[in-house]
Image: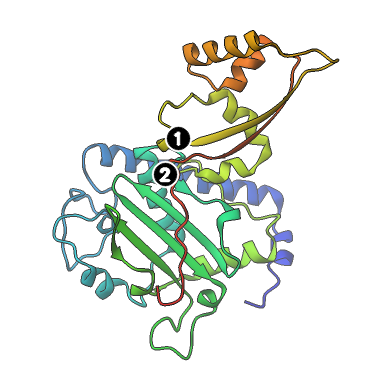
Amino acid sequence: MKEDLKKWFESIPPELLIERNKRGAEIAYKEHEKFILDLSAGLCHRCGKPMNSFNKYRFCLHWFTHPDGIKKKYFIKHLQNKELYFFGLENYFRWLAESDKPLVNINDLKDEISETKVLERTIRYKNIEWSFSIAKTDIQGHPSRFNGKEPHYHIQMIINGMSFLKFNDLHIRLSKSDLLNFEMLRQMPENTVRQHASGIGMSIIENPDNSEILLKNMTSSKDEKNSTFRVDSSISPRDGDSLLMNTFNQAIRISNEKNIPFVMALRELQPDLDITSEISPGKGVPKIAQRKKRK
């Protein structure tokens, strides 16, 4: 895309942008509200059918939850080199993941994306993991190949640790809207932010402004294997004061009693401490699946 989107963006009146963003947020909120209500009743918010139902002649997003009777060949038949709005599918996976467990099920960390990729995600819902992969060459398309001539993306689907869909099973075409969004992200990343009011992922920790909010709302995990966050802190007394062992022991007791992070308990005991905390993904967060050649 050769158009100067930044110039176009700057020509839009600010009040119009605010109105569009507000309207978009309202539409997304209403759709998510319907999604939650229908899912709680065991129904698909798109087609209205039970989530476990399957009609091989009518594709629906809830196919990705692996209803009874679904097979790989039906995905390939309906989606190979056909258009499916990427950002809509990603939102759907995010909503499912959040309905199961918030935050921990969605790995959208930028620092885990490989250099050759524009976007990579791994999202988990119960016993299913979906992973997206979009390389720079995927957005351009592969004109010399039989599959993937048009701009496209790849998806992997793992069920109970076993491969169901491999990345190269499908070349799903990106829509014009998808391509516009990616081009806006490329040309003016400082003006383009994709925010998720629902389905927030681990990228929340990449914004330092969120650290204090997260710390205040965290609870201690007794199950490190399934933990959402890991908190590492450096602690320095001020004005030459020393930290006594009984202070640490009291902080451990308060942490256990109130089910709060140790560092927050320590703050209660000594508010004047100079504490720097770094939040990273816990062991419960899925690793982003990497697409390699022929995968």
Dividing the picture into quarters, in which one does residue 191 lie? bottom right
Image spot of residue 201 (x, y percent)? 50, 44
Of residue 200 and residue 127, the one placed in the foreground of this image is: 127
Image spot of residue 162 (x, y percent)? 27, 59
> Considering the image in quadrants, where does the N terminus appear?
bottom right
Tell me which amino acid carries mark 1: Ser
Q: Which residue is mark 2?
A: 105
| Residue sitting at x 45%, y 40% | 104
Confirm or deny contact between disc 2 and disc 1 (CB under 8 A).
no
Mark 2 or 1: the one toward you: 1
Whether 68 is drawn above or below 78: the answer is above
Measured in 3D between alpha carbons, the distance from the residue under mark 2 to the one under mark 1, in whole angstroms, is: 11 Å
Whether 77 is drawn above or below 235: the answer is below
Image spot of residue 169 (x, y percent)? 33, 73
Numbered disc 1: secondary structure: loop
Alpha-carbon neighbours of circle 1 within 10 Å: few (<14), some, or many (≥20)? some
